[in-house]
Image: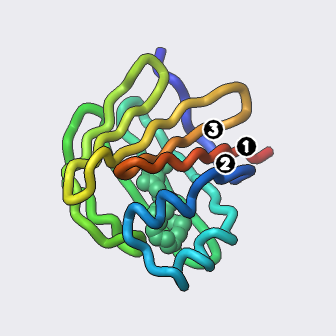
Amino acid sequence: MLADYNGTWNMVSNDNFEGYMQALGIDFATRIIAKMLKPQKVIEQKGDFFHVQTLSSFRNYNAEFTVGVEFNEETKGLDNRKCKTLVTWDNDRLVCVQKGEKNNRGWIHWIEGDQLFLELSCEDQVCKQVYKKAD
Ligand code: ECB
């Protein structure tokens, strides 16, 4: 039985987003705005297929992938880079590797109770986000 990530999740904390954005080379003015956001994740999962929307008042980001199938990701509206991206299962965790210009780039998702965790990595920076399931 696979973990079930379906649902709407609201951000409750966002640790070291600044360091993560700096590692991605995001400019100062954009970082100021981006840091103030409390994005929402809307996740639709059908087995190994995921549609993950990250929604905010400033920008949205859309990702669709199948676990175990590498795809070409363009981080449109974020740092606008191209990556070869692969998401795999590590037990109930979703582990993503984003191969490209930046080293050690990727993310990990997992669920504990009604909380969704996300760790975003780039170079030597790790951003730790927590989301809570919407009612
Ligand atoms: C889309 C909401 C945030 C918009 C921030 C705007 C500008 C900042 C530019 C770059 C910062 C890099 C990333 C933003 C952080 C999160 C966006 C989605 C991260 C992601 O890859 O989520 C995965 C896992 O949930 C699914 O795409």
* Dot 1 beta carbon under 8 Å from ligand 1: no
Q: Secondary structure at mark 2?
A: strand
Q: Secondary structure at mark 3?
A: strand
Mark 1 / mark 2, whichever is N-terminal: 2
Q: Quadrant of residue 77?
A: bottom left
| Image location (x, y in percent) of residue 16 | 59, 54
Which residue is tagged 3? 116
54 relative position to 79: left or right:
right
Q: Which residue corresponds to the image point at 64% horizontal and 58% vertical from the top-left?
A: 40
What is the spatial separation of the Cα atoms under label 1 and label 2, in whole angstroms? 5 Å
| Image location (x, y in percent) of residue 33 | 62, 79
The reply to whether discs 1 and 2 touch (Cβ–Cβ < 8 Å) is yes
The one of 68 and 85 positioned closer to us in this rendering: 85
Q: Which residue corresponds to the image point at 38% horizontal and 71% vertical from the top-left?
A: 25
Mark 3 / mark 1, whichever is N-terminal: 3
Mark 2 / mark 3, whichever is N-terminal: 2
Q: Quadrant of residue 69?
A: top left
Q: Secondary structure at mark 1?
A: strand
Q: Residues within 10 Å of mark 2 (few under 14, many from 20)?
A: many
Taking 129 as reference, is 61 above or below it? below
Which residue is tagged 1? 132
| Image location (x, y in percent) of residue 8 | 65, 49
| Image location (x, y in percent) of residue 86 | 26, 40
Q: Which residue corresponds to the image point at 30% horizontal and 44% vertical from the top-left?
A: 104
The reply to whether discs 3 and 1 touch (Cβ–Cβ < 8 Å) is yes
Tag 3: amino acid:
Leu
The reply to whether discs 2 and 3 touch (Cβ–Cβ < 8 Å) is yes
Which residue is tagged 2? 9
Taking 116 as reference, is 124 above or below it? below
Tag 2: amino acid:
Trp
Which residue lies most toward the bottom here? 29
